[in-house]
Image (cartoon, rainbow, N blue to C red):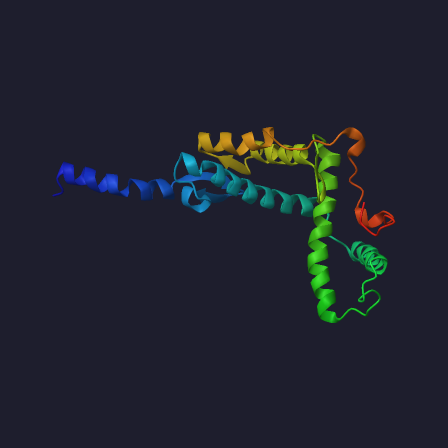
Amino acid sequence: MIRPARLLGILLALAPCLAAAQEVARVFDVPLTAKDIGLSDADSRPAAAANLRQRALKAALERFVVEHKLQATDADLEAYGKWNEEALRRQGRADAGRPVTEAQAGSRKRVWGQWITGFKANRALYEKYGGRVGLTKFGPEPIGAIEALLREREKKGDLVIADAALAKEFWSWYASQPRRVARPEEIDFTHYWLRPHDPDGARR
């Protein structure tokens, strides 16, 4: 028979392990423990919340892309290829006009496809949800729309954050974003590869 004092000592020793194994969130029916997202104490909460945001957004965007048929098409890839070829020509690159190998074509399809799909998703998100937009070196980012998408998924039960402190950290990040807010006249989600090149060959 285990003495009460001994049992208490065992439970105290196991407490960190039990806490790490406790479910703190659920993303599309996938349970996440504190260990899964790197949550161990208050100091680790910001990084854990960022980890959770990344997981939740990835899952939500994947479904958004499929539901709205935003995957890069052959026509998208062809248009991007023409834009890229013109950019190479304007830069005086030696590989401009060079035939593309089968391996290069496959690599481009994977890389460009993901890039194009991301841009199409951003545009569709803004058109559906609106909200504040951030300006980045990669183009406009629909921060308000992204938050709206996740809020919507939370209402549907696809995103559940059981830990109150973690939930506060998760959503507070959006309240402070974006760092540079786009003015109405600066918001343009037109795909840059469908625009004319600038005189210096850089994308607009």
Q: Is 90 displayed left or right of 141 in the figure? A: right
- Identify the image quadrant of the N terminus: top left
User: Compared to 194, does 110 lie above or below?
Assistant: below
Number of residue marks? 0
203, 94: nearer the viewer: 94
Q: Position of residue 67 (x, y in %)?
A: 69, 44
x 79%, y 54%: residue:
76
Please state which of residues 155 and 146 is positioned toward the viewer in this rendering: 146
Residue 71 seen in this snapshot:
no
The residue that appears at 59% across and 45% down in the rendered structure is 59
* Left or right: 99 in relation to 158: right
- Which residue does the image show at 27% across and 43% down from the upper left? 14
Q: Does the image show residue 102?
A: yes
From the top left corner, tell me how far across and down residue 30 is, in percent. 49, 45
Q: Is residue 121 above or below residue 163?
A: below
The answer to whether residue 67 is left or right of residue 44 is: right
Residue 11 on image: x %, y %: 24, 40
